[in-house]
Amino acid sequence: MRIAIDTNVLIAAVTRPGGTSARIVQTWLDGRLEVVASTATIREVELVLGAGWLARMVSPEVIEVLLEALRTRSVFIEQPPRILDLRLKDAGDLRLVEAAVAGGARYIVTTDREFLRARGYADVEFVTPAEFERLLGETGGQ
């Protein structure tokens, strides 16, 4: 199954290692999911994971492992086509939708309320980590 993971879920994964977001990231790292990323989405993750407040909570090694996985193990979409008919306040969220659509993701996993209110775009559904974990259990990751 191919998905896109919002930065807020990646932050939750490294700050709460036993949580739902961490289990989703681990499922990807175990090779049971494909994650779509683009230059813009990786840049946003690098910026946020490099923030000083996060460095006080998470070791640099954990952050670097996650960033390296995004750089080397993602389905990489260098320049996804722009989406002009979806309005989101955060340009980073729109870049994630563009990568997800171009990369053939079925879901964007996010905790962002604005995203979740939209529920989806094109063939991509926006779901919470808990909803996605339930879907994984139902489909076996297919």
Image: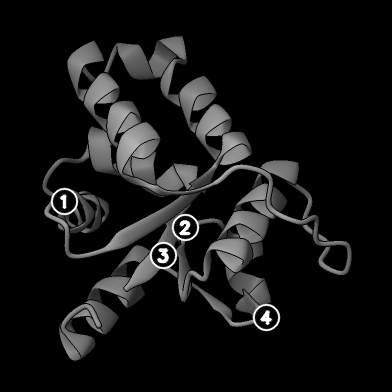
Mark 3 or mark 2, which is nearer to you?
3
Q: Position of residue 14 (x, y in %)?
A: 25, 35
Could you tell which of marks 2 and 4 lies nearer the N-terminus?
2
Marks 4,1: beta carbons within 8 A: no
Q: CA distance from mark 1 to mark 3?
A: 14 Å
Residue occupying the point 56% across, 28% down: 43
Residue where numbered disc 4 is placed? 122
Marks 4,3: beta carbons within 8 A: no
Could you tell which of marks 3 and 2 lies nearer the N-terminus?
3
Q: Position of residue 105 (x, y in %)?
A: 48, 69
The quadrant holding residue 38 is: top right
- The residue lying toward the viewer, choosing from 31 and 133, is 31
The circle on residue 43 is: none
In the image, 96: left or right of 70? right
In the image, 128: left or right of 97? left
* Disc 2 element: loop
The amino acid type found where label 3 is placed reads Ile
Q: CA distance from mark 4 to mark 3?
A: 14 Å
Q: CA distance from mark 2 to mark 1?
A: 18 Å
The amino acid type found where label 4 is placed reads Ala
Q: CA distance from mark 3 to mark 2?
A: 14 Å
The circle on residue 26 is: 1
The amino acid type found where label 1 is placed reads Gln
Residue where numbered disc 2 is placed? 111
* Disc 3 element: strand
Taking 88 as reference, is 38 above or below it?
above
The amino acid type found where label 2 is placed reads Thr
Residue where numbered disc 3 is placed? 3
